[in-house]
Image (cartoon, grey):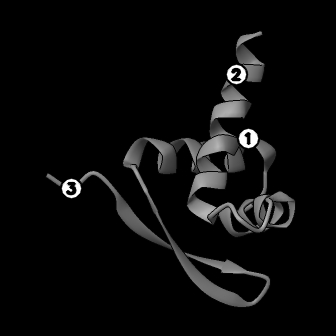
Amino acid sequence: MKIQNKHSLNLRGHQTSVSLEPQFWHAFKYIADQKKIGINALASEIDEGRVPQAGLASSIRLYVLTHYQKQAT
């Protein structure tokens, strides 16, 4: 059973990939659509704000979680 899928992103001209569970990937894409920006732009925004020790995939998960927690309050 495959839990995570690799997804390619372009961060400020550099190709990278992240492994995210399908639910997080769909939520990430949905948030980008809501903000009317592309997934690469949102990933770059998240990448710029993360601490160096945190991986990009973990930072995306936390961003998605925080986004929905804010909506719930």
Residue denoted by label 1: 34
Residue 10: quarter of image:
bottom right
Q: Amino acid at mark 2?
A: Gln
Q: Earlier in the sequence, mark 1 or mark 2?
A: 1
Kindly check if marks 1 and 3 are in contact, taking CB atoms under 8 A apart as contact.
no
Residue denoted by label 3: 2
SS for dot 3: loop
The residue at 21%/55% (across/down) is: 2
The alpha-carbon separation of the residues under discs 1 and 3 comes to 28 Å
Vertical comparison of 12 with 72: above or below = below
Q: Name the side, left or right, on which 70 lies relative to 2.
A: right
Residue denoted by label 2: 69
The residue at 77%/66% (across/down) is: 47
The residue at 56%/59% (across/down) is: 57
Q: Amino acid at mark 3?
A: Lys
Q: Residues within 10 Å of mark 2 (few under 14, many from 20)?
A: few
Q: Position of residue 5 (x, y in %)?
A: 35, 62
Tell which of 7 and 47 is nearer to you: 47
